[in-house]
C-alpha cells in the first residue's frame, strides 16, 4: 500500500515529539528545570491547579528549579508576586527574568534620554540607572519598551507615538519579546508586538529575553552545569520557549494549555492540530503535555 507524501510527512513530524501525561514520566532524566511562568505556572491572576504539587515533587527528588520568564520586571519583584499567589520560595531556586537582563544591560547606557513605553508597575526597571526620562519623542536616545500602558490596549493605540519616535530612530530595548500573553482568560498584546511594528518602520530593536542568547547565558551561569543533556526547558510558546531551547540544543517540553491552547480539544491535545502548528513554524519540542502536572 502506498503512503501519500503528506501522510508520510505527518508521521515523520509526529515522531519528532512525544506526548506525555505527567512530568514524572521524564523527570528522572533531568537535573535542571527551567520553567516558564505565564501560561505554565500561572495566568497572571492565579496559579494553575497541580503547580505546587508538581514543584514539591521535583524538589523532593533533589531537582533544581529556575523560573525562566519574559516578564519585563526584575527578579525580586517577580518573587514577591509569586509569594502573593501562594507560591513559597522553597519550591524553586531562583527567577531569571528578561526584566533583570534588561536592567543589567541598561547599566552600560549612561546620560541618555530615555522614553518609556510601559505601565507604571514596570517603572522600577529604570530605577538606579543613569538615564534621563523624557516625554518628548524628538529628543530620545533610547526607548525602553516593557509593553502596553494598559491591559486592554491594541497596537493601533501605539502607532502614532511609534511613528513619531522613528523620525529620530532611537534604539528600542524590548524587555519582553512575547507578542501576546493570556491574563486570566483574555489575550493581551505584549512588548514584542510593539517592537515588531517599530522594526517594520525601520527602527533598530534590541530584544532581551527568550529566545535570545543573553537570558540563556544567565541560565548556564546559575546552574554551573556544563552538560546540557541534564537541562529541560518547559514553556507554552513555540516561538520563544521552544525556539530558545532549540537554539541552545536543550530538550524542551511544550505545555499546550497556554497561548497555543487552540490545539487542544476538551482538555486533550489534538495531535493533528499540533502537528500543523509545528510544521507551520518549523519549531518542534521534544515532549508535549496538556498542562504541567506530576
Image (cartoon, helix red, strand yellow):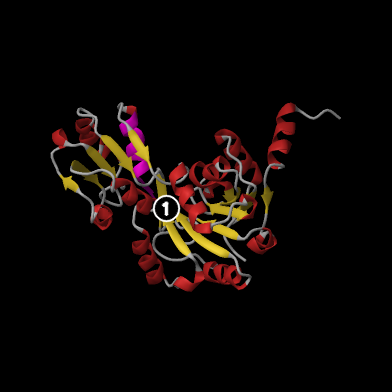
Q: Nearer the viewer, residue 222 or 287?
A: 222
Residue 203 at x, y = what percent? Answer: 30, 30
Q: Is residue 186 visible?
A: no
User: Vertically, is 264 above or below 113?
Assistant: below
As helix, strand or loop, the secondary structure at mark 1 comes to: strand
Taking the spot 53% from the left edge, 63% from the top edge, the residue there is: 65
Taking the spot 60% from the left edge, 47% from the top edge, the residue there is: 250
| Left or right of 205 in this view: 243 | right
Question: Residue pushed farthest right?
Answer: 1
Residue 272 at x, y = what percent? Answer: 65, 42
Q: Which residues are magenta?
A: 187-199
User: Vertically, is 193 above or below 76?
Assistant: above
Taking the spot 62% from the left edge, 61% from the top edge, the residue there is: 31
Majority secondary structure of magenta residues = helix
| Left or right of 152 in this view: 266 | right
The residue indicated by pointer 1 is 182
Amino acid at each position: 500500500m502506498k503512503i501519500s507524501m503528506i501522510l508520510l510527512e505527518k508521521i515523520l513530524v509526529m515522531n519528532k515529539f512525544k506526548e506525555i501525561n505527567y512530568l514524572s514520566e521524564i523527570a528522572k532524566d533531568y537535573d535542571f528545570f527551567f520553567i516558564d511562568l505565564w501560561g505554565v505556572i500561572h495566568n497572571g491572576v492565579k496559579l494553575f491547579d497541580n503547580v505546587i504539587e508538581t514543584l514539591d515533587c521535583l524538589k523532593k527528588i533533589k531537582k533544581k528549579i529556575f523560573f525562566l520568564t519574559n516578564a519585563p520586571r526584575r527578579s525580586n519583584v517577580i518573587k514577591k508576586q509569586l509569594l502573593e499567589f501562594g507560591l513559597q520560595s522553597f519550591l524553586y531556586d531562583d527567577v531569571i527574568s528578561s526584566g533583570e537582563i534588561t536592567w543589567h544591560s541598561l547599566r552600560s547606557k549612561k546620560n541618555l534620554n530615555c522614553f518609556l513605553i510601559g505601565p507604571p508597575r514596570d517603572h522600577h526597571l529604570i530605577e538606579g540607572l543613569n538615564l534621563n526620562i523624557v516625554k518628548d519623542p524628538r529628543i530620545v536616545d533610547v526607548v525602553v519598551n516593557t509593553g502596553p500602558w494598559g491591559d486592554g490596549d491594541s497596537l493601533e493605540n501605539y502607532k502614532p507615538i511609534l511613528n513619531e519616535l522613528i523620525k529620530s530612530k532611537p534604539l528600542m530595548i524590548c524587555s519582553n519579546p512575547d507578542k501576546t500573553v493570556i491574563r486570566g482568560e483574555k489575550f493581551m498584546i505584549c512588548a514584542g508586538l510593539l517592537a515588531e511594528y517599530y522594526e517594520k518602520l525601520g527602527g533598530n530593536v534590541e530584544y532581551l529575553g527568550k529566545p535570545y542568547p543573553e537570558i540563556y547565558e544567565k541560565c548556564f551561569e546559575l546552574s554551573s552545569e556544563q552538560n546540557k543533556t541534564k537541562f529541560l526547558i518547559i514553556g507554552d510558546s513555540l516561538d520563544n520557549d521552544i525556539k530558545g531551547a532549540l537554539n541552545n540544543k536543550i530538550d524542551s517540553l511544550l505545555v499546550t494549555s497556554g497561548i497555543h491552547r487552540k490545539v487542544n480539544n476538551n482538555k486533550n491535545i489534538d495531535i493533528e492540530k499540533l502537528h500543523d502548528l509545528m510544521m507551520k513554524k518549523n519549531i518542534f519540542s521534544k515532549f508535549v503535555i496538556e498542562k504541567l502536572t506530576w
